[in-house]
Amino acid sequence: MKQPKTFENYPRRIIISSNLVSIVIYLIGAFIIYQLGIIWLSIYLLFILGLEIRLMKRSCVNCYYYGKFCAFGKGKISSLFFKKGSSHKFIKDEITWKDILPDFLVSIIPLVVGIVLLILKFNLLILSLIVLLVILTSAGNGFVRGSLACKFCKQREIGCPAEQLFNKSKAKSK
Ligand code: SF4
């Protein structure tokens, strides 16, 4: 069957695969942070929850996929909790690396903690998880954006500041 240029609602297989990468990153991060104790784990999990809510409240409400199944299914979830925003705002809002730094911290914090733990006491499991975390955050997320999510996204055609930011940095690195 010929692949459509964009999806009105993403198929289940893409939603599951896209979320799987994020969920595995969260689980690895949580396991590494847990080595510091349950309090730090709770703070880390609350931080992730805060980021997810911020995304759905600030971005998904203005996205074309509000009320629909985007590549992560969040357009649908967002519509259950928040009122629809304006698609004009989605395109107008400029996104910088500073805005998405908190999202990177989800991987950077456990990465730093994991490296410190390794220096204090070598542990093969922590080392393997650090390697997996780096692969999923870089190549895994890159694959999700490039081959599953942004590639078939209607909002990309209308205009997406985040996609434009990633593309700009890709063009610079060439
Ligand atoms: S182009 Fe990519 S980042 Fe932008 S809304 Fe679509 S899937 Fe999300």
Image (spheres, helix red, strand yellow):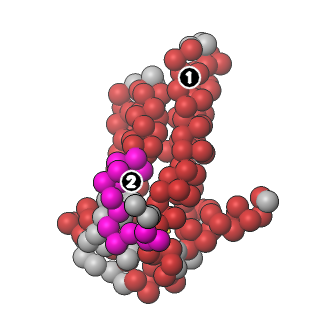
Q: Say if the magenta span includes residue 109.
A: no
Total labels: the figure holds: 2
Res 128 label:
1
Callout 2 amino acid = Ile
Cα–Cα gap, marks 1 and 2: 27 Å
Q: Quadrant of the C terminus?
A: bottom right
Circle 1 packing at 10 Å, graded few (<14), some (14-19), many (20+), is few
Q: Is residue 128 above or below residue 160?
A: above
Q: Quadrant of residue 1?
A: bottom left
Q: Which residue is mark 2?
A: 14
Q: Say whether disc 1 or disc 2 marks the residue closer to the N-terminus.
A: 2
Kindly tell me whether mark 2's CB lies below 8 Å from ligand 1.
no
Q: Quadrant of residue 55?
A: bottom left
Which quadrant of the figure has residue 131? top right
Tell me if I can see residue 103 in this picture. no
Q: Image point 77% across, 58% down: which residue?
A: 173
> In this picture, is 121 found above or below 112?
above
Q: Is residue 164 left or right of residue 77?
A: right
Where residue 104 sits in the image (x, y, percent)? 55, 50
Helix, strand or loop at disc 2? Answer: helix
Residue span colored magenta:
4-19
Q: Nearer the viewer, mark 1 or mark 2?
A: 2
User: Dot 1: what SS?
Assistant: helix
Q: Position of residue 123 (x, y in %)?
A: 56, 14
Q: Amino acid at mark 1?
A: Ser
Q: Are marks 1 and 2 in contact (CB under 8 Å)?
A: no
* Frontmost residue, 51 versus 72: 72
